[in-house]
Image: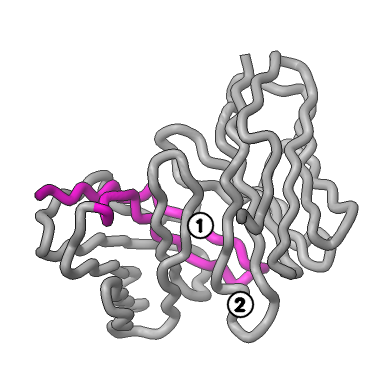
Amino acid sequence: DPKIIQKPKYLVAVTGSEKILICEQYLGHNAMYWYRQSAKKPLEFMFSYSYQKLMDNQTASSRFQPQSSKKNHLDLQITALKPDDSATYFCASSQEGLGGQNTLYFGAGTRLSVL
Amino acid sequence: GQGVEQPDNLMSVEGTFARVNCTYSTSGFNGLSWYQQREGHAPVFLSYVVLDGLKDSGHFSTFLSRSNGYSYLLLTELQIKDSASYLCAVRMPNYNVLYFGSGTKLTVEP
């Protein structure tokens, strides 16, 4: 059974609309992340959270807003969608301390296409 | 910017070995990780190194030279199923940010 659940697996949106990408992890980890992977580009760090607090944000646009309602949830709200936002968005988690933070566990990803 | 460079493609033969290279030039360094990613799937953690030298983990071994900004992932006794992309990622000192290379697509031929 997958331990990091991302929903939906595929998402098609129109330009200008808003979508929420869901992520839940059942590994008991305290740290969660969002990464983005576009065609022909490296996996790109977006956000990191620890104990539901934002630790690092390397996303230039405020259109991307993470939301953590529970310790094991980190959703990603994207507003005013653009075609350039088309990518696979990966949620990941890691365990704090004892070197656990060196290993990221990734969800299966949400493949977003903006038309 | 943060530069993590990998060759795009690598081919090798079943039963032999493959060395996937990674060079980096980043403003900080707190270790380097290797991940395997199959087409259409999520990256899977393979190894993490922070000290210089060779770390032997059986089928996968990793080498790091911090002074040269260089690492490699060595796969031995290759199998067809080792065909995948291998991603190098440099971990920054600030909270667990990883900068990934574009990945090397390894093709293992019979």
Percent coordinates x, y for residue A100 in the rendering = 61, 77
Residue furthest front in the image: A1
Quarter of the image for the N terminus of chain A: give it: bottom right
Q: Residue at x 30, y 84 (%)?
A: B53
Left or right of residue B80: residue A86: right
Q: Amino acid at mark 1?
A: Tyr
Of helix, strand and loop, which one carries label 2? helix
Give the residue at x 45% y 39%.
B40
The amino acid marked with disc number 2 is: Gly
Figure quadrant of residue B86: bottom left
Q: Chain of mark 2?
A: A
Q: CA distance from mark 1 to mark 2?
A: 18 Å
**Residue tagged by mark 1?**
B99
How crowded pointer 1 is (Cα within 10 Å; few <14, some 14-19, many 20+) is rated as many
Residue drawn at point x = 40 percent, y = 35 percent: A40
Residue B8 shows up from this direction? yes
Q: Nearer the viewer, residue B1 or A35?
A: A35
Residue B68 coordinates in the image, percent (x, y): 30, 73
Q: Is residue B12 above or below residue A26?
A: above
Q: Nearer the viewer, mark 1 or mark 2?
A: 2
**Marked residue chain, label 1:** B
Residue where numbered disc 2 is placed: A100
Q: Residue at x 78, y 34 (%)?
A: A20
In this picture, residue A90 sits left or right of residue B65: right
Asked which colour scheme the image uses, the reply is one colour
Q: Position of residue B46 (x, y in %)?
A: 41, 67
Residue A59 occupies quadrant:
top right
Q: Which range is magenta?
A: B81-110
Let me know if residue A37 is in the magenta part. no
Q: Quadrant of the C terminus of chain A?
A: top right
